[in-house]
Image: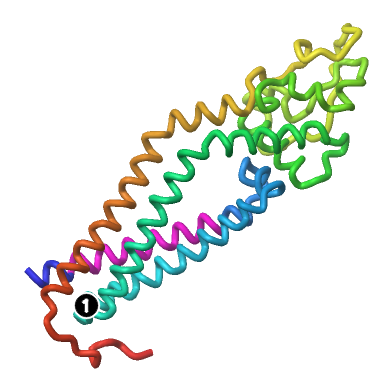
Amino acid sequence: CVCECVCVSVYVSVCVSILGAVILGFGVWILADKSSFISVLQTSSSSLQVGAYVFIGVGAITMLMGFLGCIGAVNEVRCLLGLYFVFLLLILIAQVTVGVLFYFNADKLKQEMGNTVMDIIQNYSVNASSSREEAWDYVQAQVKCCGWVSPSNWTRNPVLKNSTKTTYPCSCEKTKEEDNQLIVKKGFCESDNSTASENSPEDWPVHPEGCMEKAQAWLQENFGILLGVCAGVAVIELLGLFLSICLCRYIHSEDYSKVPKY
């Protein structure tokens, strides 16, 4: 029974180490990403950068704890198993806390995202040279949306507001499936067959949906997958906690000479 428990504990510890690597990689991706909603938020919110460093720290600690759990289980060292249990419990509590905070602050995050996007739209320049303008162009082109709530959000931009021709953001333009999706248009475009006397969003050849609607639709479609991943992570961590307690109960004496020295 002890041997089986040790084997399962080793497998769980390996899974915990892999989980730590995934968390660490997610934090690095947040800092390195330059072409998504994450990049748009990161340029305007320091809290997201802090969160990325927290992910990196938690991921590194989780990987280390998984490694210590393997050593503690194989060599039957209660001290390492106890340390593994304590840190794994703290990580689980932190994850639950973050999940609860995110749930109750979802509306606030949504409002912050909307304010950030509207600021980008209002100050969007003809050349679209800044990193956050390029990131928003990429989002609109890849998600196939325009504006935050609707394309009419772009009428707050001074260039489009004062234009007498049918002028619209190029990244919002409807593209054919055979067009190269990797090429993202920047700046403003003018319609060739315009007969209107004012620049109205109804005349723009752009995607009619706002990006907020597309983001909400994606979350609803993938909510089951996200929930399943979170539940799977929680099960692995709870199993690690349970097995570490069981091994600590079975190990009555510990020999520190078994611990490998590096």
Q: Position of residue 171 (x, y in %)?
A: 74, 30
Q: Residue at x 69, y 38 (%)?
A: 138
| Quarter of the image that includes the N terminus | bottom left
Q: Is residue 241 above or below residue 180?
A: below
| Quarter of the image that includes the C terminus | bottom left
Q: Residue at x 25, y 63 (%)?
A: 241
The residue labelled by disc 1 is: 74
Query: Image quadrant of residue 197?
Result: top right
Residue 23 on the magenta span: yes
Q: Is residue 40 above or below residue 253?
A: above
Q: Is residue 45 above or below residue 255?
A: above
Q: Position of residue 101 (x, y in %)?
A: 47, 45
Residue 10 on the magenta span: yes
21 relative position to 193: left or right = left
Magenta-colored segment: predominant secondary structure: helix
SS at mark 1 in the image:
helix
Q: Residue at x 86, y 23 (%)?
A: 160
So how many labels did they put on this image?
1
Q: Position of residue 50 (x, y in %)?
A: 60, 58
Q: Position of residue 245 (x, y in %)?
A: 19, 68
Query: Image quadrant of residue 2?
Result: bottom left
Which three-letter amino acid code belongs to the residue tagged 1?
A: Val
Of residues 225 and 240, the one drawn nearer to the viewer in this rendering: 240
**Residue range highlighted in magenta:** 7-27
Of residues 250 and 136, the one drawn nearer to the viewer in this rendering: 250
201 relative position to 29: left or right = right
Mark 1 is surrounded, within 10 Å at the Cα level, by few (under 14), some (14 to 19) or many (20 or more) other residues, namely some
